[in-house]
Structures are given as structure tokens and as C-alpha cells.
Image: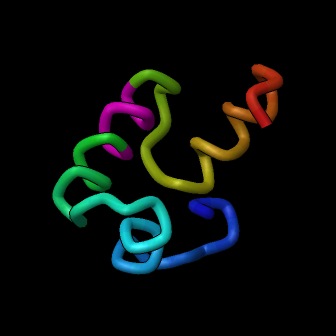
Amino acid sequence: MLASGAKDETIARELGLSERTLRRRSSALLARLGAANRFQAGVQAARRGWI
């Protein structure tokens, strides 16, 4: 959903999370991937075979 450009509000609603929880998890994911933004996170995730 991040890769498709969906807004945090939409993603949170689809996953049954609060926006704050989604942002916290997204931030942790970007840090784990060493990415500065969602696009970079998508590239790194693809390189690692996560998606």
C-alpha cells in the first residue's frame, strides 16, 4: 500500500490500525531498511526480496 501511494489514513483504516501506530511502524520499517522515504523503502524491500 505504501508503494501504491496510498495515504496513511487509508492504509491505517485498511489494516485496522490508528494513524499514529501506522506512522510509528512505517518509521521503524524505513529505519530498518535504511531508507529516507517510501520510494527508497520500496526499492530496498524489493532488493531484499521482501516484496
| Location of the N terminus (image quadrant) | bottom right
Q: Main secondary structure of the magenta part?
A: helix
In the figure, residue 47 lies in which quadrant? top right
In the figure, residue 4 lies in which quadrant? bottom right
Image check: 11 left or right of 3?
A: left
Q: Position of residue 2 (x, y in %)?
A: 57, 61
| Residue 36 versus residue 28 in the image, above or below | below
Q: Position of residue 7 (x, y in %)?
A: 45, 78
Residue drawn 44% across and 79% down?
A: 10
Q: Nearer the viewer, residue 25 or 32?
A: 25
| Residue 4 versus residue 16 in the image, above or below | below
Residue drawn 43% across and 44% down?
A: 36
| Residue 42 versus residue 30 in the image, above or below | below
Q: Position of residue 37 (x, y in %)?
A: 47, 52
In the figure, residue 15 lies in which quadrant? bottom left
Give the extent of the magenta segment.
Answer: 26-31
Q: Nearer the viewer, residue 30 or 15?
A: 15
